[in-house]
Amino acid sequence: GQSLEQPSEVTAVEGAIVQINCTYQTSGFYGLSWYQQHDGGAPTFLSYNALDGLEETGRFSSFLSRSDSYGYLLLQELQMKDSASYFCVLRTGANNLFFGTGTRLTVIP
Amino acid sequence: DARVTQTPRHKVTEMGQEVTMRCQPILGHNTVFWYRQTMMQGLELLAYFRNRAPLDDSGMPKDRFSAEMPDATLATLKIQPSEPRDSAVYFCASGLDEAHYEQYFGPGTRLTVT
């Protein structure tokens, strides 16, 4: 089986930096993805890490350490529109994705 | 602007009725996924197709749920008979097999079974 742990809620101030951590357990590992979902909306893909290290896409970065079974999503220069749920997603096989329960990020002025 | 489309967007039905949800994947995508999202269970994979062939439907209650892809532009998810516990948002997503970690989600069908 597999499991994912991420905080259920995070609050941060507009303009600040926030890090959302994710730890996982799995017998088969292909990679870790991050998705964003606004209330009432659909999940949208943010990033993917298959190898250790940092991937940067604009204000968002994602990090993976396979030896620690750990990853994080870093959001910089927070904007109000970043308030959403963020899911870390485990790719456990060529065709298998397992979604975490999500972290609800609230950005306050 | 290529998007996954789903119909209907909202569906309210009575227990015991048949429900059919439809999805049009992005043209050229060869993988299609059905997910269900509830507050309690989060986002769960129900079924997965590659090149229209079902590869994994282990997440789907077999006695009442069925998923098909009659052609490359249409995927369907059917519930018969529906039960109140089926109330959820059902998402369809599509992608390319070689990069299926990046899935494109449709807007979802919000199903309420009374």
Image (cartoon, coloured by chain):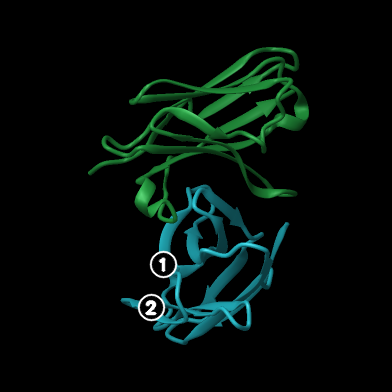
Mark 1 and mark 2: span between their CA atoms? Answer: 8 Å
Secondary structure under tag 1 reads: strand
Q: Residue at x 45, y 70 (%)?
A: A50
Secondary structure under tag 2 reads: strand
Give the colour chain A carries in the figure: cyan
The green one among the chains is B
Circle 2 packing at 10 Å, graded few (<14), some (14-19), many (20+), is: some
Q: Nearer the viewer, residue B37 or B13?
A: B37
Q: Residue at x 34, y 25 (%)?
A: B72
* Residue B58 position within the rendered picture, expressed as x and y whole percent measured from the top left: 66, 36
A48 versus B95 height, above or below: below
Side of A44 relative to A64 (left or right): left
Q: Nearer the viewer, residue A88 or A18?
A: A88
Count of picture labels: 2
Where, by quadrant of the figure, is residue A23 drawn? bottom right
Q: Amino acid at mark 1?
A: Ser
Where, by quadrant of the figure, is residue B51 drawn? top left
Q: Amino acid at mark 2?
A: Glu
Circle 1 packing at 10 Å, graded few (<14), some (14-19), many (20+), is: many
Find disc 2 in the rendering and name its residue. A55
Per the rendering, the mark at residue A2 is none
- Chain ID for label 1? A
* Residue B104 position within the rendered picture, expressed as x and y whole percent measured from the top left: 39, 47
Quarter holding the N terminus of chain A is bottom right
Find disc 1 in the rendering and name its residue. A47
In terms of sequence position, does the residue under pointer 1 or pointer 2 come before the other?
A: 1
* Residue B40 position within the rendered picture, expressed as x and y whole percent measured from the top left: 75, 49
Q: Residue at x 69, y 32 (%)?
A: B87
Q: Are marks 1 and 2 in contact (CB under 8 Å)?
A: yes
* Residue B20 position within the rendered picture, expressed as x and y whole percent measured from the top left: 55, 18
Q: Residue at x 67, y 63 (%)?
A: A27
